[in-house]
Image (spheres, rainbow, N blue to C red):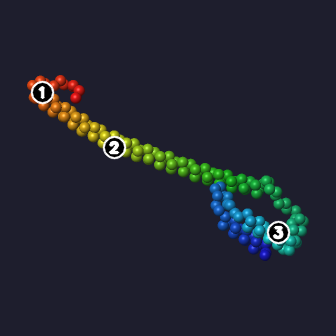
Amino acid sequence: MSTFRVVDRLETVVREGIWLPFGWRAVPADRILDLIEKLRSSLPAEGAGATRGAEASPRRVPREGEAPADSARMASADEILARAQARADEIIAQAQNAARDIRRGADEYADQVLASLDASLAKALAAVQKGRQTLALSTASGNGKPAKEGSAI
């Protein structure tokens, strides 16, 4: 298998990986390791001359942790972090608006229930007062004595 073909397959495996937050992907390790092994086995046959040429070249490839690749990675990480923070702020604002709307709706519902209860209690109180008046009148007319106002029943 040619090096380019292995690299293409490696790229496919990475693209098919599961998307994770902050730009990461989960890929099957066994497939990646298999493709790396195929890449290694194809390098000596295809890249022996290129290796010698690279060793003779005065241009140095930066090591891991060195600039400019590291600074580009940091800029990318900073951009990802900034986008994630902006998205988090947006989600928090939406949640706060939703909570405010829910609270407002709950307050309105509670007010409606209390108003209904107030009306029911007012009707019940009126019925109780009317019943007491009727009882007082019938008691007063029945034995000739007026009933005491405010007396317990």
Look at mark 2 in the image and give the residue it sits on. Answer: 112
Q: Left or right: where does residue 136 sit relative to residue 105?
A: left
Q: Secondary structure at mark 2?
A: helix
Q: Nearer the viewer, mark 2 or mark 3?
A: 2
Q: Position of residue 30 (x, y in %)?
A: 74, 65
Image x and y of residue 32, in percent: 74, 66
Indicate the amino acid at tag 2.
Gln
Q: Earlier in the sequence, mark 2 or mark 3?
A: 3
Amino acid marked by disc 1: Ala
Picture layout, residue 51 above or below residue 115:
below
Q: CA distance from mark 1 to mark 3?
A: 114 Å
- Residue at point 47% right, 46% down? 99
Q: What residue does disc 1 label?
A: 140
Task: Give the secondary structure at mark 3.
Answer: helix
Residue 61's disc number: none
Tell me which label, 1 or 2, sits earlier in the chain.
Answer: 2
- Residue occupying image coordinates x 25% and y 37%: 124
Q: Are marks 1 and 2 in contact (CB under 8 Å)?
A: no
Mark 1–mark 2 distance (CA, rounded to whole Å): 42 Å
- Pointer 2 and pointer 3: residues touching (CB < 8 Å)? no
- Give the image location of residue 64, x and y in percent: 80, 56
| Left or right position of 30 against 108 | right
Q: Earlier in the sequence, mark 1 or mark 3?
A: 3
For label 3, the residue is 40
SS at circle 1: helix
Q: Residues within 10 Å of mark 1 (few under 14, many from 20)?
A: some
Q: Amino acid at mark 3?
A: Arg
> Which of the two discs, 1 and 2, sits closer to the camera?
1
